[in-house]
Image (cartoon, coloured by chain):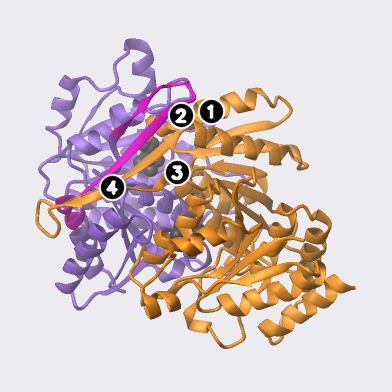
Chain colours: A orange, B purple
Amino acid sequence: MARIAVVAGDGIGPEVVAQARKVLDTVLPGIEATEYDLGAARYHRTGEVLPDSVLAELAGYDAILLGAVGDPTVPPGVLERGLLLKLRFEFDQYVNLRPSRLWPGTTGPLASVKPNEIDLVVVREGTEGLYAGAGGVLHRDTPAEVATEESLNTRHGVERVIRDAFARAGRRERRKVTLVHKTNVLTHAGSLWARAFATVAAEHPDIETEYQHVDAAAMFLVTQPQRYDVVVTDNLFGDILTDIAAAVTGGIGLAASGSINPERAYPSMFEPVHGSAPDIAGQGVADPAAAVLSTALLLDHLGHPDAARRVTEAVAAELAARTSGTPRRTAEIGDRLAAHVAS
Amino acid sequence: MARIAVVAGDGIGPEVVAQARKVLDTVLPGIEATEYDLGAARYHRTGEVLPDSVLAELAGYDAILLGAVGDPTVPPGVLERGLLLKLRFEFDQYVNLRPSRLWPGTTGPLASVKPNEIDLVVVREGTEGLYAGAGGVLHRDTPAEVATEESLNTRHGVERVIRDAFARAGRRERRKVTLVHKTNVLTHAGSLWARAFATVAAEHPDIETEYQHVDAAAMFLVTQPQRYDVVVTDNLFGDILTDIAAAVTGGIGLAASGSINPERAYPSMFEPVHGSAPDIAGQGVADPAAAVLSTALLLDHLGHPDAARRVTEAVAAELAARTSGTPRRTAEIGDRLAAHVAS
Ligand SMILES: CC(C)[C@H](C(=O)O)[C@@H](O)C(=O)O
Ligand SMILES: CC(C)[C@H](C(=O)O)[C@@H](O)C(=O)O
């Protein structure tokens, strides 16, 4: 039986993770889950973000389920670089997988798009680019100050994530991959991405391909999100595009993600795209849908596609049944989802 | 009387610029305009993108009006880096100004937003960041290939564009500036931007400020574009965000821009955000609205705010009068706009 580590984290993290675990325990009884106390609370209490010993322990699990980490009281970058990105990089989670669907029963902000018309997945590179942390500051707080950030892209890193995107497209109905970059300005990295894409595309003559500049893709995600199937892009562009994709499919409250090492050399990590939402934490009103959908991605990754499908269907049914009355509370939604997968 | 250089460019560029000039000549008779043949056509004919002698001549004008340059037959980057970005950098056009309004008579893609509710301007840095062109490729087309792109940010460059944003906010009704960056990941450049922003904000206690990560801003531009007044951000984030802002305000066909050197040490450049649209070029169906609105920004910059207002009002009236029947042709719209500013 699979062993997973659970990092509930801060804010609404523990509330939504509790529901995800209800659903997980119901659909796959006997899964062994161990809680790890990481995030803003631990940082304030002990000054620690991710001790090496904890990193080493986490490496032993089959997967990690994460709620949300972060709090305005922690300086920017400390938990992001020290915990989230550290895990993505250390565990070589190079496929950052973010599906977006406009679910039946939900309405997005776009007037012309109906449920089921949007069904796309962004395959975001997770271990390179501007997220490498390369850069620095000189002459701080003087008129001569300069600050740099460097985007590092390797053929190794770029080609493997593009391969993953084509493999996923091959398992989907529309079989289309869109590469998004900014080759007309970022000519060095853009050239590497475009050439690696062409190489992999040539091995998949059955898959339709297109290229778009990131600014055009950001626009089309708003005006014609229906046109996308699989989108593959770099770390920073993927960060931005997946929030647009979430926005046009009913908001970040429904957006799930996986940080995946497809070779399973390290544990993959599954987490809602939303943050810790300190403003509504502790009130029992957070929507656990994104955490539960992330659990479906986890089940899929662990080789339980049927369980994953049942969880996804439970969320779809719950969303379709949502009325315009008082929204259900976090725990009640979790109970209903668990009951649905049990039935 | 002002002297301007006109670069009509490729595709629909000449068609929309012709209408912009009709309007310009009507609202400010006697303006002296000299045409420059630059873009894909010249590149194919002579191999030249922007000869030094032309650059030197252009430096002598009060402003540049540009239609669109580019064609799929030119390799990515050649005209962008060699012409557009070259002009922005050589002429120190550090304020890339992009207003977005949901005009009366138009509908955007968002179900919940009504005309007049969106009225924002993005002040995008135009001479630094990832657009600097710093980077390279090693071990091309081998498994060891690496490609880099470097974002260069100076206190000088960042602070001056933030000052411009605050000055603009001070002349607007809502008096609010939103800084957009990614300080939690791009900690070096993010720190410089955040500190420079805090410095300038302290000098403007009457102006409301907020900070958002670029992914959140991309999302809120879709779900709540009404919340923004002035947005200040770096070169690449500004490129992406302004296309989203265009998308939620009726599309890129209405988006105007100015690449401005506020000190007037060099000519500023005004151009529609849209490209050369080779698919519809030569058919007389391109919408000249964005080119005409760019001309209004040019007039404003040259110290003719009344003329600028008349041009803007003509476009607003034309948009409000648009019916759902056959769209008017490019030249007819130009004639109507010119007649409107004349009346
Ligand atoms: C919190 C932050 C480091 C992270 C990112 O930028 O990747 C988040 O925005 C995300 O999308 O998972
Ligand atoms: C054509 C390209 C270089 C340019 C940019 O990225 O700045 C365009 O997208 C724009 O927004 O003006």
Question: Which disc, if any, is residue A135?
Answer: 4
Residue at 29% in and 34% down: B133
In the displayed structure, does residue A223 sit left or right of residue A303?
Answer: left
Residue named by callout 3:
A128
Which one is closest to the eye, mark 2 or mark 4?
4
How far is disc 3 from disc 4 in space, using C-alphas? 13 Å
Q: Dots 1 and 2: beta carbons under 8 Å?
A: yes
Q: Amino acid at mark 4?
A: Gly
Indicate the position of residue B298 as horizontal and vertical percent values: 25, 46
Indicate the position of residue A80 as horizontal and vertical percent values: 42, 62
Residue at 63% in and 71% down: A34
| Circle 4: element type | strand
Residue A249 counted in the magenta span: no
Sequence-first disc among 1 and 4 = 4
Q: Amino acid at mark 2?
A: Leu
* Above/below status of A158 relative to A29: above
